[in-house]
Image (spheres, rainbow, N blue to C red):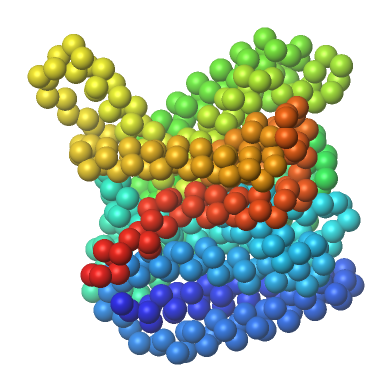
Amino acid sequence: MLLAPVLTILGWFLSMLAALMLVPSVYAVSDQDMTVAAAFFVTAIGTCFLGGGLILANRMEAPRLNSRETYLTAFLIWTVVPAFAAIPLYLSEAVASPLDAYFEALSGFTTNGASVVDNLDDQSRGILLWRSLIQWVGGFALIILVSTLSSAFNMPGNTPLNRAIARSTRRRLSRRIRFGVLSILQIYALLTAICIVFLWLSGMEPFYALCYGFGTLSTGGFTVTDHGLELFGNRFTELTLIVFMIIGAISFSLHWAFFNGERRIYFQNPEYRYLIYLLLVSTAGMGILLSFETDMPVLLTVRYAVFNTVSALTTTGYTLAPISESGEFFWPVGVVFMMFFLMSIGGSTGSTTGGIKLMRAIMLFKQGVAEVKRLSYPTAVITLQYGKNKITQENVLSAWGFFTLYCFSIAFISLALALTGLDFQAASALAVGNLANAGAAITPLVAGADGTGVEFTSYSDLPSASKVLLCIAMLVGRLEFFTILALFSPSLWRR
């Protein structure tokens, strides 16, 4: 096994993390919050020392990065990097314990959005900025991970970016990887900057625009105020968030192709078309449910249906709670179930979203339709198509395997959370939301719901065992199950 490329990539991630720590450190100094500034500065020095050491100690050029090294790299990045990102959260006393600090950092890096930080209005702006930066980096790392592992997950077709990287065969491995990383980073940073500018023009304070810009394109879901999005109450702000949540839910290989001259690439991609169709149908369905179960005006119903549908399907987790007849926030049961369904599906493959992903959901749906047809025509030969690509038996088995693992994981984590004392309604909601990396939506949806066990009020009040289980759920959901299982497969290490 070649550990040099694994440790080198980890070293680069840690070095980048150390450089980013200087941003909240400088911001804290400008706010004269020297405790927070010192926490970030000291952690940045230690992280940079370790990251730079890993790079210098493994300078040799690896001939190739095998699947074994790729899986290990992904696992180490998503477990080690959040540990270092958590250190300043604990040193600055923004959280009460090392476990809470790791939970917060891992939630940000997996773009899950679940938060144990209470009293956001009283927190240092350096801490709030750091939470947003973590999820922005995590969204970028996810795009690179999925682009790298897409072939291992038996996805049909090939992306424009992967084709471009494959054509650059004259370049060494490290230069080809660097080409892909920098190409995506440029587009990711440009779209983030545009989002920040539009949020600022919509009336947001520059600091809020910066934090929500980082959190929206990464579909992370961290909020920076105790009042959530209701604080702004601005239609232009909501429209900007909707547009950029959708952009974050589209495969970044399509964005790359668009910026490189393929102007019609979006409409040529079947997953993009399915995403738009599902958004339209789900918005109409949620609007109907809201119109029947609330007394909100028509325009307000449409507004809430559009925003919550986009947020759920993109697994961002921002919510605008519907208002009941008495003027209180009220979530109709049908709307809650629909949001959990959309969270579980998620956005496009190669995006920053969580969930099963639309490509797998469409393949399973097509396979289901084909099986129904076989009931009438048992000897028929039915060819499944995904766009212009043929869906092979391996593609279908891979999708079914993922779906099966996903369902078993929900059942197992729900049961385990219930054993920690939570009522089963809250346990199930937490399992579904955090496996889909949409944990930010759970608190407004189920907090305080009636149950027979310990009621869920916030992530910070959960028992330590529950937090550990949710950390596992975030990690497993983000690494797409197969990465974790492959590392525990003896056959992988015997090769």
Residue for point 66% across, 53% down: 465
Is 176 placed above or below 251 here? below
| Rendered location of residue 189, percent (x, y) | 56, 59
Residue 52 appearing in the image: yes
Residue for point 70% across, 75% down: 22
Residue for point 75% across, 36% down: 455
Asked if residue 47 lies left or right of residue 375, the reply is: right
Single out the residue that lies furthest toward the left.
379
| Rendered location of residue 168, percent (x, y) | 27, 67
Q: Quadrant of the N terminus?
A: bottom left
Is 452 placed above or below 88 here? above
Of residues 90 and 283, which is closer to you in this image? 90
Asked if residue 138 lies left or right of residue 388, the reply is: right
Query: Disc count in the image?
Result: 0
| Rendered location of residue 191, percent (x, y) | 56, 52
Residue for point 38% across, 38% down: 404
Single out the residue that lies furthest toward the bottom.
57
Q: Quadrant of the C terminus?
A: bottom left
Asked if residue 1 lies left or right of residue 87, the reply is: left
Where residue 133 sits, quadrant-wise, is bottom right
Where residue 442 sits, quadrant-wise, is top right
Of residues 422 and 15, which is closer to you in this image? 422
Residue 190 appearing in the image: no
| Rendered location of residue 223, percent (x, y) | 74, 48
Of residues 252 and 221, which is closer to you in this image? 221
Is 348 placed above or below 197 here? above
Of residues 426 and 474, which is closer to you in this image? 426
